[in-house]
Amino acid sequence: MRDTLVRATPLRTRQKPSRTQLISAAVTTALLLFTLFALPQLLSLYYIDTMTQVAVYSMVTLALGVLVGRVGLVSLGQVAVLAIGAWAAARLLFATTQPYPLILLEAGLITMVAGLIIGLPALRLRGLYLALITLMFAGAITVVLATVNFPNGGHGFTGYNGSLVHIPPIRRPAVAGSDPAYFRYSVVVAILMFALVYAHIKTRPGRAWAAIRQSEPAALAAGINTWLYKLWAFALASFITGVAGGVLAGAVHYLYSIDFPTQDSITLLAVTLMGGVYSMWGAVVAALLYQFLPALLNNWGVSADWLIILFGLGVLQVLTTAPAGLADQVPKDLARLGRRLRGRARPKPEPAPKPEPAETKP
Amino acid sequence: MPPWSDFEPFIVSGLALGGVYALSGVGLVVLYRATGVLYLAFGAVGALGALIAWSLVTKADAPGWAAWLAGIATAAAVTLGYGLIFGPALSRRDPLVKAVATIGLTLILYGAMDLLWTTSGGQARSLTLPTDNGGFSIGQIQVNWTQVIALAAGVVITVGTGAFLRYTKLGTAMRAMANDREITATLGVPVRKVEAAAWLGCGVLAGIAGLLLADLVALDATTLTFLVISSLAAVLIARLRSITLTFAAAILVGLLHDLLTPITSLTNYRDMTPFVIAAVGLLVLSRRQVMSQSREEA
């Protein structure tokens, strides 16, 4: 008997979807349709490129959110994983004429293998030590990439030729050559990745992860193969981040190792925590914070350093008062604000009745 | 393989770098043992202190010693302030949460430093200590006093901290808290005061390390802030416990890093040294890991 605890308490019950579930599904669909069809018409090229980056980084923060929020593993090396994915995709795009979706899949799988090679030894450690060893691996990978360089159309294994004068751009899929089309393409890939994570969360791995997050000894005692499921989470996160790296390669056309510094992994963890790691919306919020806000501030002529300060404050706030992040906090605060505004018009029913009900009446 | 004489100057610079890593490592370990906080903002507060010292010397014509003291005092004040506000607030949380919270402080300081001391100006800043000029030579090798001070500071701080923890009342209290905070509090030790002392000491060390690294490596907010990642290597090999082991690992990391410089095939990879040593050390040393429910994750 394995996974007895998980089987005994199924999270999913066969019921008709409730009204709120229907509404949220409808809102999500409407938002997605708006993003795919209306948004590229409304935005300038500058913001379309920015939103492509948001789509890419929403996958990266989604993967990190799975690790941190679902399983309780903190990784401080996700930008290095993204760089591996981008490198693999760029190398394959220069070397072969395979269709783009296949390349994305391969880049994801190669990154997954790399992630497993790191994860296999690293997962013997827990908590703080695991976070720090991923930081150490990220530092090492960054140094290697700075020496090996990203492929630029050269030959050999590295595909880098330092003396090339006309560097060919990394190609995009034939169906998505223009910037708006590539934006739609990235959103579709991101949706697929979100669906992949959703499928995991709603089935056995998600329940095993939830048990591990609550207490690893308890999960082990309940017969869950904690080693397998932790490694699975690591592999899934690496795969998604690798696919994101592949999308990034086509989006920017040229890749440089200086764009993937180790410290960005630290900032990435900060925005992921701020966005919220317990809901998939948090990944989107985090990506907007990480890519859209800097572009907006840049357009306004405000230094991006203010944003770094804001991220720092955000981390401290999340850790001390709002563990579920902005994706959880903002709707709650809005609801509270809404109640307060309505409360001015008519008294709201108190959740816990006070001893003197007379006071609540106007 | 280059001739031995090519390596000689790098022994000196490697030992100096190792000395600063040791100094940083000891500060990190003592604070971690006393409060459970791995202070990832160590590099950032050091950088802030160094930049303030630089501003005082170049902009306000302050005498050197006053500027350096001001820099160290700033680093200590910021660290103590953070410890007093967020130490108690997060005292019951997991060590991982406490460490990530210091990333928040790192980002705040880093953003502020980048705003106030903009790097886009073009000219590189440099902080030179008067000890750079004097020096002596052993055989063919030139040694300047800053390098001597860096290594000596590492040794003195390690030995001094060891003695402090062993023989003083405050040191004993810190060791007790490293074992069990609750029991120590029950025994009547003023836990908050001891923690504040640890934060202050760590801040002073961060300030000193910042000044030395600004001179030995570069005066640049980004470099200094994230140099803490390299210092962490020594701390990790010592598993955040032993300061003697921290010292040995720090010297090893510093020496190996600089000794790889003259080897052409490896020189580009020398910055990997701390990461590789830390990763290997952690994995080898972590074989006997026991799963426990206690807050002490190791």
Image (tube, coloured by chain):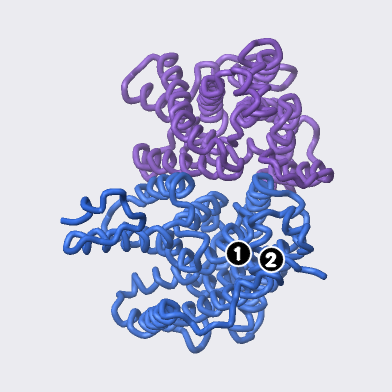
Chain colours: A blue, B purple
- Which residue is drawn at the image coordinates 80% and 35% (left, top)? B3
> Looking at the image, which residue is at 59% across and 30% down?
B35
Residue A317 in percent (x, y) is at: 42, 46
| Mark 1 element type | loop
Residue A150: assigned label = 1
User: Where A153 sits versus B226, above or below?
Assistant: below
Check the residue under mark 1 and report the chain it is in.
A
Q: Secondary structure at mark 2?
A: helix
Which quarter of the figure has residue B11?
Answer: top right
Left or right of A117 in this view: B45: left
Which quarter of the figure is the N terminus of chain B placed in? top right
Query: What amino acid type should be assigned to the residue bearing mark 2?
Result: Ala
Give above or below for B265 relative to A64: above
**Percent position of residue A9, x then y:** 66, 69
Query: Mark 2 falls within which chain?
Result: A
Q: What is the quadrant of residue B136 in the picture?
A: top right
- What kind of residue is marked 1? Phe
Percent coordinates x, y for residue A144 in the rendering: 67, 54
Pointers 1 and 2 in contact (CB under 8 A)? no
Mark sitting on residue A208: 2
Give the residue displayed 57% in from the left and 51% down from the top: A262
